[in-house]
Image (cartoon, coloured by chain):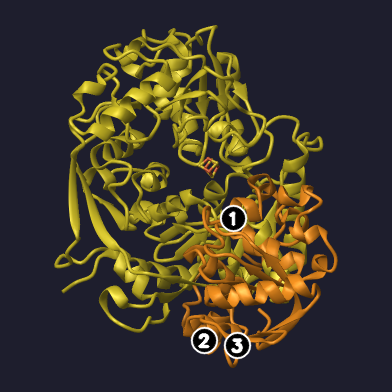
Chain colours: A orange, B yellow
């Protein structure tokens, strides 16, 4: 996982609450064999509507989603996070996230930053009055800057630390690689190996 | 205090103890001795490695096979279903890229992942074995701690050869006594699940113990451990003994020479200590056990073959009552109907539960010299290409073909509706597989889980039957298993 310290990119105001994961990515896209390439699946149903925010310039190249409360509710599909990331989003701002979505985001390196709803409203106004305004998300100082708005955000310490260090679950385990290597050295030699292959 | 077998295996694999105690304890990091891979749950895991630029840590502890999507006919032709073909091709590309040993369709070692590991001698006592498949519990028959895992964990094992795991509770399943003729391992496990329920094993590792278990062959022990997951358990295991060693000896990946002696010395320590305590103990009487069969749509809805379809009203629990009503409706059954009066359309002998050589032999012994009910279709699908070859060397294929059964190539086949072998809506099947869920064997299909000998007897009579219901076989038939 890449380290996340700060990110600056075009903000996308999504004035909608209760965006569930079925909206973020419909079930039909779950049959795929890849973990990437879900950009076309993001908000697939909504994107059929020409007036949807991501169908408008300059929002189509946005990388910071500023959404209403209760973002990511419903099904636990990790594909929702994959789709947001594949589309190009690095951070989602909301006043409330569904637990599972927040957990999945942390695993996959997408920053889910929790702001006060008042601050979300202020940022929405800036983005709507001056489309294309960039949002700066600073994980070190836990603040968001957009136009003249500067607002603090919340994220749990453990996730913040993992994001700052760029550690996913595997990365975390690999921090103990010495322990793994040491264990490997103690394994009895009679334990089987699949290679070189032996057959009857 | 002493330790249970499962705790011994766990402790021997702790790379790093999780910090904290009790409910707040972080998971332990456990080393994984063997990672089995198949085409369905691996693509995103391989992709994850690729994206992160990580190597697969131990290709020499990893092995892959193709099973879920593979057809059991015309295996030399390209797979007709495009999604299936892509999934298989993806596995082939991934294995090549990451240096993983793969047994592809057409290879003599190809087959259902849980049949292939033991048969190559890769599954051994005291190991930790994982696979992105819930029936990994099969390998517990060797006294290994074997667990099914999800795709993210598959990637974790690929990258680190370890898994973070929270401790489990232990349950002893004591099966004492002697099985009567016609009663087998499948009946034991169906009876266990009917007794403790499909959620009864949740959070537990089961250890099967007692004289009836000790008397079982390895193939039979695998049948039992295989279905531990159907009781909701994390894993199920049997302590290794001479039966285990005899099975292992001489297998391609079994230790040899001095290594063998060292291994046996260690394996001999792998049993639950006399002063160890299980969190729960369950007893089952083998002497009185009868052939078992499911009437409903979960593996816990089973009864003895001599009984009748239960009345939903007989269930005290309101949820069980509703579940029974719904199940009877789906199954097209009327309460009170003797199980043995139920006619089937199809008999399926196969799946990682019952597709090993002994299962085929047992079924062949029942049908030899007998005729199939002409209205019944029977599919015989060996668990692996090696089992198929072995069966052919013994002439079992001829027995099945003469009987009128279809002799297929190895794979998961009709165990799940992912390949061409599927039931039609409403079609009723006596199946040696492990799940009788709605639609599991094909949309609208109706599954009765049975043992191999019950499957065989059912194919003769056309209704659910045990071998003891059959007329004596015609005298001209040979009754030995090695009639080539
Ligand atoms: S035979 Fe059935 S249960 Fe076993 S691995 Fe294949 S699909 Fe799963």
Name the disc covering residue A143, or none: 3
Total labels drawn: 3
Residue A62 in which image quadrant = bottom right
For marks 3 and 2 on the same chain, the one whose residue lies earlier in the sequence: 3
**Dot 2 corresponds to which residue?**
A176
Which residue appears farthest toward the right when viewing the image? A57
Question: Which subunit holds the residue at mark 1?
Answer: A
Tell whether B9 sits left or right of B279. right
Quadrant in the picture for residue B417: top right
Q: Nearer the viewer, residue B238 or B482?
A: B238
Disc 1 is placed on an element classified as helix
| Mark 3 Cα shell of 10 Å, populated few (<14), some (14-19), many (≥20) | some
Gap between marks 2 and 1 measured at Cα: 34 Å
Image quarter hosting the N terminus of chain B: bottom left
**Nearer to me, A37 or A124:** A124
Mark 2 — on which chain does it sit?
A: A
Q: CA distance from mark 1 to mark 3?
A: 26 Å
- The mark nearer the N terminus, 2 or 1, is 1
Measured as percent of width and height from the top left, residue A107 is found at 57, 72
Residue B316 horizontal side relative to residue B194, left or right: left
How far across and down, in percent of the image, does residue A53 sit?
76, 60
> In the rendering, which numbered label is found on residue B200?
none
Q: Gap between marks 3 and 2, in whole Å?
A: 32 Å
Can you tell which mark lies on residue A21?
A: 1
């Amino acid at each position: 996982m890449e380290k996340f310290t700060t990110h600056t990119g075009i903000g996308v105001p999504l004035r909608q609450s209760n965006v569930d994961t079925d909206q973020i990515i419909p079930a039909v896209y779950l049959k795929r064999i890849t973990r990437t390439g879900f950009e076309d699946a993001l908000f697939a149903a909504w994107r059929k509507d020409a007036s949807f925010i991501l169908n408008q310039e300059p929002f189509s190249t946005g990388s910071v989603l500023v959404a209403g409360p209760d973002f990511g509710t419903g099904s636990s599909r990790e594909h929702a996070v994959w789709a947001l990331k594949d589309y190009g989003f690095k951070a989602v701002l909301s006043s409330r996230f569904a637990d599972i979505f927040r957990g999945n985001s942390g695993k996959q390196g997408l920053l889910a930053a929790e702001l006060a709803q008042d601050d979300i409203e202020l940022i929405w106004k800036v983005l709507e009055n001056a489309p294309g305004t960039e949002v700066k998300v600073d994980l070190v100082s836990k603040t968001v800057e957009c136009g003249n708005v500067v607002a603090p955000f919340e994220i749990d310490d453990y996730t913040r630390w993992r994001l700052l260090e760029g550690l996913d679950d595997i990365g975390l385990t690999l921090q103990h690689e010495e322990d793994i290597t040491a264990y490997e050295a103690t394994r009895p030699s009679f334990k089987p190996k699949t290679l070189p292959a032996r057959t009857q | 205090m002493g330790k249970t077998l499962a705790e011994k295996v766990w402790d021997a694999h702790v790379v790093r103890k999780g910090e904290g105690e009790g409910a707040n304890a972080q998971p332990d990091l456990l080393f994984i001795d063997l990672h089995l891979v198949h085409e369905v749950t691996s693509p995103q895991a391989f992709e994850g490695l690729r994206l992160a630029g990580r190597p697969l840590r131990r290709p020499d502890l990893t092995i892959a096979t193709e099973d879920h999507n593979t057809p059991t006919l015309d295996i030399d032709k390209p797979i007709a279903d495009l999604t299936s073909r892509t999934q298989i091709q993806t596995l082939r590309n991934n294995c090549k890229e990451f240096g993983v040993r793969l047994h592809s369709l057409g290879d003599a070692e190809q087959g259902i992942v849980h049949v292939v590991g033991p048969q190559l001698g890769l599954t051994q006592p005291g190991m930790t074995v994982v696979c992105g498949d819930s029936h990994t519990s099969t390998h517990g028959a060797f006294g290994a701690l074997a667990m099914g895992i999800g795709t993210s964990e598959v990637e974790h094992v690929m990258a680190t050869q370890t898994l973070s795991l929270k401790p489990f509770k232990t349950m002893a399943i004591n099966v004492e006594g002697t099985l009567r003729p016609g009663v087998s391992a499948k009946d034991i496990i169906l009876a266990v699940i009917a007794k403790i329920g499909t959620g009864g094993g949740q959070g537990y590792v089961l250890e099967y113990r007692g004289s009836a278990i000790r008397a079982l062959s390895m193939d039979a022990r695998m049948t039992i451990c295989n279905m531990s997951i159907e009781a909701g358990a994390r894993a199920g295991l049997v302590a290794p003994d001479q039966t285990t060693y005899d099975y292992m000896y001489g297998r391609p990946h079994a230790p040899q020479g001095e290594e063998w002696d060292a291994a046996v010395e260690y394996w001999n320590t792998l049993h639950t200590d006399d002063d160890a305590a299980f969190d729960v103990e369950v007893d089952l009487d083998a002497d009185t056990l009868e052939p078992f069969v499911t009437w409903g749509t979960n593996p816990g809805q089973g009864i003895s073959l001599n009984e009748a379809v239960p009345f939903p009203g007989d269930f005290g629990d309101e949820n069980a009552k509703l579940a029974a009503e719904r199940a009877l409706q789906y199954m097209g059954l009327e309460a009170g109907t003797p199980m043995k009066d139920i006619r089937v359309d199809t008999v399926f002998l196969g799946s990682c539960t019952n597709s090993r050589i002994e299962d085929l032999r047992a079924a062949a012994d029942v049908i030899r010299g007998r005729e199939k009910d002409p209205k019944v279709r029977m599919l015989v699908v060996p668990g692996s290409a090696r089992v198929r070859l072995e069966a052919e060397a013994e002439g079992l294929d001829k027995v099945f073909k003469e009987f009128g059964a279809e002799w297929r190539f190895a794979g998961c086949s009709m165990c799940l509706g992912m390949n061409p072998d599927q039931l039609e809506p409403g079609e009723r099947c006596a199946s040696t597989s492990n799940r009788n869920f709605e639609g599991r064997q094909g949309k609208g299909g109706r599954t009765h889980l049975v043992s191999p000998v019950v499957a065989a007897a059912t194919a003769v009579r056309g209704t659910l039957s045990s071998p003891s219901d059959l007329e004596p076989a015609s005298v001209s038939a040979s009754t030995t298993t090695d009639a080539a």
